[in-house]
Amino acid sequence: MSLASFLLPERLEAGCDEAGRGCLSGPVYAAAVILPNEFYHPLLNDSKKLSEADRYTLRPIVEAEALAWAVGVVSAKEIDEINILNASYLAMHRAVDQLESRPDFLLIDGNRFKAYAEIPHACIIKGDGKYAAIAAASILAKTYRDDHMMELHEQYPDYGWNTNKGYPTVKHRAAIKEKGACEWHRQSFRLLKDEQLKLEL
């Protein structure tokens, strides 16, 4: 991974990434992280390429050493209202909103973004594997969302959210087919491949 700064060393760059975009249930999370230019950790990488243990090892390190960090959340209900793409943008905006320091530039993982205020940005495909700040954001977004899905699993254990975290696994879809959808499922998503669902509250 390149740890080089995207801009000049004196500029504050916030890396932004989301987690949970492809899930059938639960919120989408995003994080924004401003790292010091000298930050380095040998484990730091795209959260998808790390083990769960490594992600949770890195989270407190990122939080302790970042110049600023924050997490934004958009609920399943909001996702249904504005669609998942806009929800991903909104989650990133909410994360940036909460940063204690206002960044000069945003590094966005992916190829699209809705501009935030007057802060310039760059979209970087697979940026979570190229820039430290984006990788750090991916780790915070992923671990905080996983924590939340573990909490939801206590309410609805049938869906296996403790392992699938809301993603469309065979077990998850089988549980939806048997039990129906619950209040935390995204009704705008195709929860089952070939059948209509009834919301059970």
Image: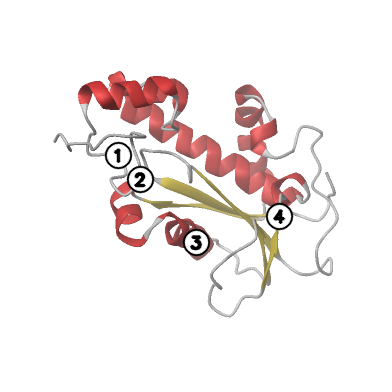
Tell me which numbered mark, 2 or 3, is placed earlier along the sequence: 3
Q: Are marks 4 and 2 in contact (CB under 8 Å)?
A: no
CA separation in Å, label 2 and label 1: 8 Å
CA separation in Å, label 4 and label 2: 24 Å
Tell me which numbered mark, 4 or 1, is placed earlier along the sequence: 4
Mark 4 — residue?
A: 125
Residue type of the residue flagged with mark 1? His
Q: For mark 1, give the secondary structure.
A: loop
Residue type of the residue flagged with mark 4? Ile
Mark 3 — residue?
A: 89
Mark 2 — residue?
A: 189
Tell me which numbered mark, 4 or 2, is placed earlier along the sequence: 4
Q: Nearer the viewer, mark 3 or mark 1?
A: 1
Estimate the x, y position of residue 189 in percent, counting from the top left.
35, 45
- Looking at the image, residue 114 sits to the left or right of residue 169; the answer is right
Estimate the x, y position of residue 68 in percent, counting from the top left.
61, 56
Residue type of the residue flagged with mark 2? Phe
Q: Nearer the viewer, mark 2 or mark 3?
A: 2
Q: For mark 2, give the secondary structure.
A: loop
Q: Are marks 2 and 3 in contact (CB under 8 Å)?
A: no
Given residues 71 and 195, the one toward you in this image is: 195
Residue lying at the far front of the rendered structure: 194
Residue lying at the far bottom of the rendered structure: 118
- Numbered mark located on residue 185 in the image: 1
Point 35% across, 61% down: residue: 82
Tell me which numbered mark, 4 or 3, is placed earlier along the sequence: 3
Looking at the image, is 180 positioned above or below residue 131? above
Badge 4 local density, few (<14 within 10 Å), some, or many (20+)? Answer: few
